[in-house]
Image (cartoon, rainbow, N blue to C red):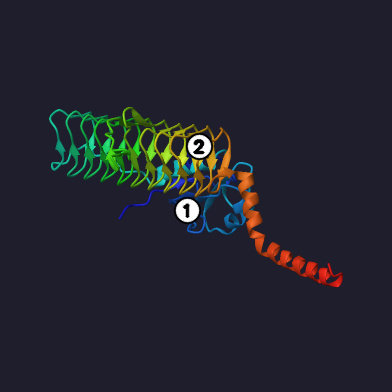
Amino acid sequence: MKQKQFFSLHDLAQKTGGRLVPSSEGEREISGFTTLDAAGANDLSFVVSDRFRKEAAESKAGAIILPEEMEVEGRIMIQVKQVWKAVIRMMELFYPEPQPSGEIHKTAFIHPEAIAQAHVTIGPYSVIEKGARIGEHSVIGALCYIGKNVSIGNHCLIHPHVTILKESEIGNRVILSSGVVIGSDGFKYELIDGVPAKIPQVGKVVLEDDVEIGSNTCIDKASLTETRIHRGTKLDNLIQIAHNVEIGSYCMIAAQTGVAGSVKIGNGCIMGGQVGIKDNIAIGDGVMIGAKSGIMNNTPSGSKFFGYIAMPGHEALKREAMINRLPKLQETVKNLEKRIRELEEKFEV
């Protein structure tokens, strides 16, 4: 059983860059970090806004991280500028990731012409093909397949059961969750003599630095050039990225989204779950798309879309409000029709 570590509130305040209130509680020891409802007297917890003041006041937590402009009477507080930044620091402290062993398992197959740099970890039954290159301190989990001439940067984490097919390029500090497939053929068929004919896909996939891809997401290689995910973008589980797609930097895309071929997505875009994007269109910078929206045309930078077929957000909300009023409107129309008939009969119109 893992032995608990204890940290003083003074130390924790220093590590978060926050201010301890009251400062006299600095020597109090904390042994855990968890949610408000699960926290006990020896735990530190957090609250992100004044919206959760009631929960913070009722929590049994020994101390609470909260925004610097917020106070909860009677509670020990660490006030910080950025709560989520402090949460990340506490997660690293209380739930540290195990350090890679730097060992290559005896059952792994590494082609003689593949290169694994210093301190690379490779798990059981993984296959590293000819010409592949794995950067320093990267981890390849069990049962992974790294294809011919694949390049993987430094400090990457490739979870078990990931497939990276030939010629793919993976940057530094990239995380690929279990079941990810990088570089499979794009879905490209043309009718020739009345039947679908497969068009060869000979391009590649490029993932830039600090990209993270969720479980069972698939990113197809380009027809001739490249499918590229720019720096810092985060993709959720169960996403399909088709051939020739380009996604800008620091985008966040939620689960079950499908992006069709040759779509260009700008920087800093956010998409909810189950968004569908038509092929060969452009999404501007900073676009926000609500869940289950269907995007059929180019969208300008900074716009917000919701609905199917998607339309500007304020128009979609008006439409939804009108739909909700239809039963009452129908009843009103029936009453008006009845009154018109009565007037017609009265005046023999």
Residue at mark 1 to residue at mark 2: CA–CA distance: 36 Å
Find residue 268 and report its horizontal and vertical position in percent. Answer: 50, 34
Q: Residue at horizontal 52%, vertical 35%?
A: 298
Mark closer to the observer (1, 2)? 2
Q: Quadrant of the C terminus?
A: bottom right
- Tell how many labels: 2
**Left or right: where 296 falls relative to 201:** right
Q: Residue furthest front?
A: 348
For the residue carrying disc 1, how many other residues have a C-alpha within 10 Å: few (<14), some (14-19), or many (20+)?
many
Q: Nearer the viewer, residue 141 or 98?
A: 141
* SS for dot 1: strand
Q: Residue at the spot x=43%, y=38% of the render?
A: 279
Residue 56 pos. (x, y %): 58, 54
- Along the viewing direction, whichever of 225 and 3 lies nearer the viewer: 225
Above-or-below relation of 341 to 124: below
Q: Which residue is mark 1?
A: 43
Question: What's the residue at 28%, 35% (across, down)?
Answer: 199
Kind of residue at disc 1: Asp
State whether residue 337 appears in this view: yes
- Farthest residue in the right direction? 347
Residue to which mark 2 is pinned: 269
Identify the amino acid type marked 2. Answer: Cys
Q: Is the residue under label 2 in contact with that under label 1 (CB below 8 Å)?
A: no
Q: Secondary structure at mark 2?
A: loop
Q: Residue at x 66, y 55 (%)?
A: 322
Asked which quadrant contains residue 110, the reply is: top left
In x, y percent, where is residue 30?
46, 50
Q: Nearer the viewer, residue 348 or 166?
A: 348
